[in-house]
Image: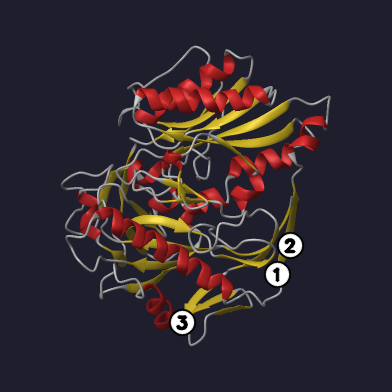
Amino acid sequence: MKLELHRLFVKALKFGDKTGFANGTLTVNKAELLALIAEDPLLGKNLDVDLAIPGDKTRVLPVKDVIEPRWKIEGKGQVFPGMLSDVETVGEGKTLVLSGAAVLTAGKLVRFQEGIIDMSGPGAEYTPYSKTYNVVLVLEPSDPNMDKHDYEKACRMAGLKAAGYLAKACADVKADKVETYEFANLRDAMNAMPNLPKVGYLYMLQTQGLLHDTYLYGVDVKKILPTLLSPLEVMDGAITSGNCVSACDKNNTYSHQNNPVIADMLKRHGKDFNFVTCIVTNENVTLADKRRSSTYATKLAAMLGLDGVVITEEGFGNPDADLIMNCWKCERQGIKTALLTDEYAGQDGASQSLADSCPEGDACVTAGNANEVIVLPPMDKVIGYAEEANVIAGGWNGSLAADGTITVELQAITGATSELGYTKLGAYTI
């Protein structure tokens, strides 16, 4: 497979008469974009589109998803297959990317499981999306009593449509940079680099129902058994988020599109190891389902003769059991593991970090403690609904002060402890 990402680097964002890109500036026709998302009868009449610019004293909440604008300019399939387009396989051809831009979907959905993005101040230091030029969709349901699954789908589709619309409008602009990626078929990959260990990526997707859902080619992942996927398919939009979960470690669509684990493994491919495949697996609710999926995922790793796997989690608590099952079932088959997760260790950092553990899980990377408390100062502008700070996960009744100050845990900040490593937190040795 061969994929070219044609990048336009967005360095400014504004409203204007025509949506397009020139000299680093993305211009958005607000009325046209509003009309596009208003086509969905499930969305209400009081929709809005606003802009959140890096460095501005702007706060966006509650944020549901973050999506990078993209459009397929050559090759099979189209962006967000199974959602915006037919289900042709992606991961090949040429895809336009508006690097530095993002679409945010905001509005009251599950309420307690959405997030905050500050474009400046201390909160901005914890979210990567304080550095993106954000087109914000403020959404509401056409009926306040609408089933939340229907409203979530409407919000999800609005964000994907907006992302496709923005990139399509720039499809004729010559790219600032073209990145080319190639990935071998399984036959060739298995016979290549005999002196290097064969390594895979075990990619856990949250799929617990009750709006804790992720989609692969438009299919709710809890409905499938673990399967093999090329990393180029992931990079080209095969996975989209439908998750309404804690903001800090929600793997939003943007982080799937720009998965840093895949990016780093591709850089090290052929040098430190032979990166053979991604194995996509689900995170389930019942013990029987966890056993089934973990056994099947680790069976695939063993069938391929993998020497090691990197395992990433999404969420916390219940999914910790899936993470640990995947770990020890690999290790006991002779497959070395490295785990990437975050912690819920209490506000003082002294509590048990994960809900489960095993002796084999001795190579673990943490993305930080989501219970750490932060004070967010008032902003000049709030896009969305500031009062949701009192109910979102990581907040509490009284989190929002009268002057606009918000006191919350990192759990409330979008992407703060991303378990894909798409975060601004780091560590150093002292």
Q: Which mark is residue 178?
A: 2
Residue drawn at x 35%, y 58% is: 153
Q: Which mark is residue 26?
A: none
Q: Earlier in the sequence, mark 1 or mark 3?
A: 3
Q: Which mark is residue 175?
A: 1
Residue drawn at x 37%, y 36% is: 370
Are circles 2 and 1 on residues that touch, CB within 8 Å? yes
Are circles 1 and 3 on residues that touch, CB within 8 Å? no
Q: How many angstroms separate mark 1 from mark 3 (CA)? A: 21 Å
Q: Is residue 77 above or below residue 127?
A: below
In the rendered structure, the answer to whether residue 126 lies left or right of residue 266 reads left
Residue drawn at x 16%, y 58% is: 402
Are circles 2 and 3 on residues that touch, CB within 8 Å? no
Looking at the rendering, which quadrant does residue 89 occupy?
Answer: bottom right
Q: Amino acid at mark 3?
A: Asn
Q: Which residue is mark 3?
A: 29
